[in-house]
Image (cartoon, rainbow, N blue to C red):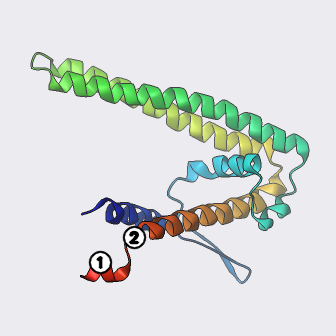
Amino acid sequence: MNTKTFVLGLVVTAMMGSSISIAKEEPVKLEVTDPQAMATTLAEGLIAGDMPKECTDVALDDVQKGQIKDAYFDFRKQKNTLDAEIKNGYMDLSKTMMSATSTKDEAAANVDTLKNSMMELGTAKADFELKVFYDILKPEQRSPAFKCIMKKMKMIAEAKLRKACKLLPPEEAVHN
């Protein structure tokens, strides 16, 4: 399997898990692969200034926009640290498991360290989501924000699919 086919397979798999439909006559259908990415999507869209027009219904004031951005940057710093801890934890576990003199207890200690770092990351993500949706947004803003985020996630997924499709060879090259 070549790299382009593999990448397309990953993107299609992600798209299938992220199918979103927003229409006036039907309810929002959601299959979010990473529900903890919702507040991140909102914050990154605010920072980049590329939110869909549907997001005007959220009616964020300047204070809320600033609070979301600040919370996002605080979360990203924490996430960067925890991501590095997890990466290093995997390296430590690999080194332990490759050693002819390591013990099961040493490997178990590496696994426990990894589990703790992953749990901290999950907690940080959940705390960020809760902060945005319950400490920053007003109750009447939650539903419009959710719909806005789903639209933005759909736009991101569609862009990834378009990019992946550009990587594919022409159809006649595949069938020869």
Residue of label 2: 168
Label located before the other in sequence (2 or 1): 2
Q: Which mark is residue 174?
A: 1
Q: Amino acid under label 1?
A: Val
Closer to us: 142 or 172 = 172
Looking at the picture, which amino acid does disc 2 mark?
A: Leu
* Most foreground residue, 136 or 68: 68
Q: Which mark is residue 99?
A: none
Instruction: Give coordinates of residue 90: x percent, y percent.
Output: 32, 30
**Residue 18 shows up from this direction:** no
Residue located 54% across and 30% down the image: 80
The answer to whether the residue labelled 2 contacts the one labelled 1, judged by CB atoms less than 8 Å apart, is: yes
Residue 176, above or below 131: below
Horizontally, is 132 left or right of 58 in the view? left
Return the x and y of residue 103 as percentages of the image width and height.
15, 18
Q: Residue furthest top?
A: 101
Q: Is residue 147 above or below residue 139?
A: below
Q: Residues within 10 Å of mark 1 (few under 14, many from 20)?
A: few
Label 2 element class? loop
Q: Position of residue 65 (x, y in %)?
A: 82, 44
Q: Quadrant of residue 158?
A: bottom right
